[in-house]
């Protein structure tokens, strides 16, 4: 297989065809900031924070490093003046949307961004699309980006509380600005987006400790996704903590005499 | 407009079973329908229809049927596509003499039949008035708007009934496809198109032949797609082609399919063009019946099936990857195109996407040869280009000129100059992705590279002429507002950058501009050009950047002096009558809708600023240029 010759910030290195610039940079210890990228998901190239300067042959252009497939020898510069100014502008624009985000404040410090350059919009979302993408891949496929232009937003179908949510919380975990809230209240798990309830899922009840745990989901679907059709789903009236206790007791009872 | 008024005489149950039979079929049609016979062609294009041209055609039908012809050949009445000179519609052309009548009303019909059709007399009040010479012209060939054009792609529009394929065949439709099927290998077709120098007419100007060659090189099911999502405000070139000569486009797509190796094609037509959808559906159906499209085309075993998909009101779906996403039934959002759509496009398969006008050029390149095409236009931009010339010129409409024609020629010779002796200010080209070109560049030839050099683009052919009464800041604000509505919203630079630019422009046009606004606009514009995900974003800064480049003083006057010198931004100017120039004719006083103007006959009038709503009626109506903007 052909190896590509890459000059990364002046240093010579190699790459395999169709590797992305971000992969090559990571392998070589060169840091490129990202916001909408996750190694678990297909790149979206929406935030544009990871843009770098690429020269292939005689053409120099700006490309996003998260998804650009290297197919010829190239020179890459990840930190030029124009790029730094562009990153600063992205942060300034996003800060106006989400003035309270810690992640953005951290980036702002690094690129010298003026935190109050533009009139704040008082939103809490940077429209990175990570929540929608992860929900599509591992969750209940309930979140999407709907609308166009400045009205684009993370939403459920028809803006209503979704019956498809499985309460996995992947969206909560992946959001870089902590805009999605999850809370277990008695026997229900509530997911809140943009201050509105996106999903309300029932929780299982443990007959042993009398507490609520885990969302009630159709486990057959999960088993199918895992390819496990023959293993029966577990007993839902036992929470993980009590199940561990019970198993521990069984083992202790069986081997008590030996030990 | 779904039936022909006079059906073309043809042999019943026709089908072409061999490519060579098409020529015989065509000759047979011509023998039964004299191409030089008397005809009245009524324009039913997008400009003339709303002005009542269909009523004119109906009246003509009735009047011609009732008149006494005394053995003379009865003229055919044809409802055709756009005749081109839209500002003078409804237009009626009388063949074979080429008599041109403008602003025709139903009440003019009986006179036209009596005088012109029966007795060969001309009606002066319906003739075109040349603004430069003040003479009238009775024939199309004498009108500079027409005789300075080179109508090749538009050659059939205005002459044929778009709902009758036989009309198009008589003028050569599908002869290119028949020639290619009987004499050429797919590789040869691609070589001819490459050699012709044809570049994409949708705006990007990529070599069509190279795109076809590239698409053909990738394995898989290949698709031929036509981008008929013409979205630039003021552009109607593609519309005229689809509604006036649909077969030129269908034949071009079939030739592409033959060259690249595809059996499936789609036309993505914007939702706002229902008439184009009708002409296309009828065209595809009639072509399939004759064996010119569909299965086993002209008996050669070549299959090409075409379908139509409609847009849903999104400008961004004119972007190739957004179009393909929408065509797949997904949301119309662009994707980063590091892997070209000729490799992975529609349904992740190799796809060839071309603009309507690009396809319309193909048949004649095959029939007349690549050298014929390359000999026209310039070295780097071969052939002709269709423009929609709009704005403040005397003549407004569809214009086709060889590449390399100067802007001056277009505005003054073809456009007839600017009425009422107003000063030319700029030409806006390329729609929301383009820029404004000022007076000092009027001699710039219209071509791909030359317009880019002066800070604009040719784009798909929109050309808006602006004069001293247009405010360049407002023009920039208009296009920015358009783009804010149409941006898909995925990437930060376009979504956030545009809305912040609009905020600043709104403030400036309201008189709330601040020091540093121009610098911020420039910074945002350049940032969007470098960092956006798709073409909409990377070109979104152009209207603002080009107007700042050439009309910076106008921005500065708005910001520092809070004044709009062109008299457009209402909070920033007042109307005032110059007592030295005013003749006291009273026209403005009568036009004013709020009675803000007072004065005695033959004495200078005055405007009461408290009552004035700045509707512009007095200024527009004054024949003595005595109303000032202060």
Image (spheres, coloured by chain):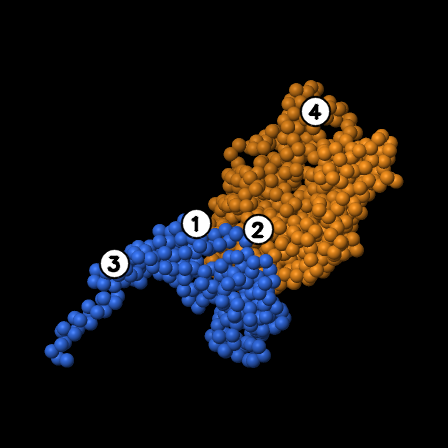
Question: Where is residue B299 shown, x and y percent of the image?
Answer: 50, 45
Please report contact status of discs 2 and 3: CB closer than 8 Å, yes or no: no
Residue at position x 80%, y 41% in the image: B576
The quadrant of the image that shows the C terminus of chain A is: bottom left
Residue B107 is labelled as: 4
Discs 2 and 1 lie in a common subunit: no
Along the viewing direction, whichever of B522 and B343 lies nearer the viewer:
B522
In front of the other: label 1 or label 4?
1
Judging by the rendered image, the residue that carries numbered circle 1 is: A159
In front of the other: label 4 or label 3?
3
Distance between the Cα atoms at labels 1 and 3?
A: 29 Å
Residue at position x 58%, y 73% in the image: A79
Residue at position x 52%, y 61% in the image: A98
Counting other residues with Cα less than 10 Å from the Cα at mark 3, is it few (<14), some (14-19), or many (20 or more)?
some
Image hue for chain B:
orange
Discs 2 and 3 lie in a common subunit: no
Question: Where is residue B112 shown, x and y percent of the image?
Answer: 72, 26
Judging by the rendered image, the residue that carries numbered circle 3 is: A205
Residue at position x 64%, y 60% in the image: B525
In front of the other: label 2 or label 3?
3
């Amino acid at each position: 297989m052909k190896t590509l010759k890459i000059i990364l910030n002046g240093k010579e290195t190699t790459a395999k065809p169709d590797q992305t610039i971000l992969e090559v940079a990571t392998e070589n210890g060169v840091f490129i900031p990202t916001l909408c990228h996750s190694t678990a998901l297909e790149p979206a190239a929406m935030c544009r924070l990871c843009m770098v300067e690429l020269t292939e042959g005689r053409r120099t252009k700006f490309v996003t490093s998260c998804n650009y497939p290297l197919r010829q020898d190239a020179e890459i510069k990840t930190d030029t003046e124009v790029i730094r100014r562009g990153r600063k502008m992205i942060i300034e624009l996003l800060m106006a949307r989400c003035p309270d985000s810690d992640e953005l404040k951290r980036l702002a410090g690094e690129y010298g961004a003026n935190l109050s350059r533009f009139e704040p919009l008082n939103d809490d979302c940077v429209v990175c699309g990570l929540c929608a993408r992860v929900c599509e891949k591992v969750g209940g496929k309930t979140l999407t980006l709907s609308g166009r232009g400045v009205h684009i937003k993370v939403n459920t179908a028809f803006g209503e509380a979704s019956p498809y949510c499985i309460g996995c919380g992947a969206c909560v975990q992946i959001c870089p600005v902590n805009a999605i809230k999850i809370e277990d209240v008695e026997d229900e798990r509530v997911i809140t987006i943009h201050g509105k309830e996106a999903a309300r899922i029932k929780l299982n009840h443990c007959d042993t400790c009398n507490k609520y745990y885990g969302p009630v989901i159709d486990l057959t679907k999960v088993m199918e996704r895992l390819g496990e059709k023959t293993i029966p789903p577990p007993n839902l009236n036992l929470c993980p903590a009590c199940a561990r206790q019970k198993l521990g007791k069984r083992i202790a009872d069986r081997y008590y005499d030996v030990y | 407009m779904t039936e022909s008024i006079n059906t073309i005489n043809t042999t019943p149950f026709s089908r072409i079973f061999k490519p060579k039979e098409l020529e015989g079929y065509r000759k047979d049609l011509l023998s039964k329908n004299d191409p030089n016979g008397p005809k009245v062609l009524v324009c039913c294009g997008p400009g003339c229809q709303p002005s009542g041209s269909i009523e004119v055609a109906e009246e003509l039908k009735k009047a011609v049927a009732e008149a006494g012809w005394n053995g003379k050949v009865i003229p055919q009445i044809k409802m055709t596509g756009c005749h081109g000179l839209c500002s003078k519609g409804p237009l009626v052309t009388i063949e074979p003499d080429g008599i041109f009548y403008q602003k025709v009303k139903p009440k003019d019909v009986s006179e036209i039949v009596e005088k012109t059709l029966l007795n060969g007399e001309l009606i002066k009040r319906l003739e075109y008035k040349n603004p430069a010479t003040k003479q009238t012209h009775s024939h199309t060939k004498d009108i500079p708007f027409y005789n300075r054009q080179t109508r090749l792609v538009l050659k059939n529009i205005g002459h044929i009934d778009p709902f009758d394929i036989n009309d198009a065949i008589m003028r050569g439709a599908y002869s290119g496809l028949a020639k290619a099927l009987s004499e050429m290998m797919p590789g040869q077709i691609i070589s001819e198109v490459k050699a012709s120098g044809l570049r994409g007419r949708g705006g990007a100007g990529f070599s069509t032949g190279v795109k076809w060659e590239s698409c053909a090189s990738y394995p898989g099911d290949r698709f031929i797609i036509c981008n008929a999502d013409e979205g630039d405000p003021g552009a109607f070139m593609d519309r005229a082609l689809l509604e006036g000569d649909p077969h030129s486009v269908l034949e071009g797509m079939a030739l592409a399919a033959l060259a690249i190796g595809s059996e499936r094609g789609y036309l993505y037509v914007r939702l706002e063009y229902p008439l184009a959808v009708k002409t296309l559906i009828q065209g595809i159906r009639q072509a399939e019946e004759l064996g010119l499209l569909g299965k086993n085309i002209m008996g050669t075993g070549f299959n090409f099936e075409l379908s139509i998909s409609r847009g849903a009101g999104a400008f961004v779906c004119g972007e190739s990857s957004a179009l393909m996403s929408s065509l797949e039934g997904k949301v119309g959002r662009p994707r980063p195109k590091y892997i070209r759509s000729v490799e992975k496009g529609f349904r992740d398969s190799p796809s060839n996407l071309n603009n309507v006008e690009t396809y319309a050029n193909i048949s004649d390149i095959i029939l007349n040869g690549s050298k014929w095409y390359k000999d026209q236009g310039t070295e780097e931009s071969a052939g002709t280009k269709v423009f929609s010339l709009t704005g403040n010129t005397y003549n407004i409409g569809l214009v086709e000129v060889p590449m390399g024609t100067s802007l001056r020629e277009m505005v003054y010779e073809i456009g007839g100059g600017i009425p009422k002796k107003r000063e030319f200010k700029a030409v806006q080209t390329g729609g929301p992705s383009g820029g404004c070109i000022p007076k000092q560049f009027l001699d710039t030839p219209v071509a791909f590279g030359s317009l880019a050099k002066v800070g604009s683009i040719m784009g798909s052919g929109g050309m808006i002429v602006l004069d001293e009464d247009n405010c360049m800041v407002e023009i920039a604000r208009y296009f920015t507002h358009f783009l804010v509505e149409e941006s898909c919203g995925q990437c930060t630079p376009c979504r956030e950058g545009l809305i912040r630019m609009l905020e600043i422009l709104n403030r400036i046009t309201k008189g709330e501009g601040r020091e540093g606004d121009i610098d911020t606009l420039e910074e945002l514009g350049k940032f969007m050009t470098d960092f956006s995900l798709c073409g909409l974003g990377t070109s979104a800064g152009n209207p603002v950047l080009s107007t700042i480049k050439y009309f910076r003083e106008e921005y500065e006057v708005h910001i520092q002096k809070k004044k709009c010198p062109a008299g457009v931004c209402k909070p920033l100017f007042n109307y005032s009558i110059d007592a030295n120039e005013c003749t006291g004719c009273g026209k403005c006083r009568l036009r004013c809708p709020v009675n803000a103007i007072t004065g005695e006959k033959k004495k200078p009038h005055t405007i009461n600023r408290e009552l004035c709503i700045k509707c512009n009626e007095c200024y527009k109506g004054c024949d003595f240029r005595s109303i000032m903007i202060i």
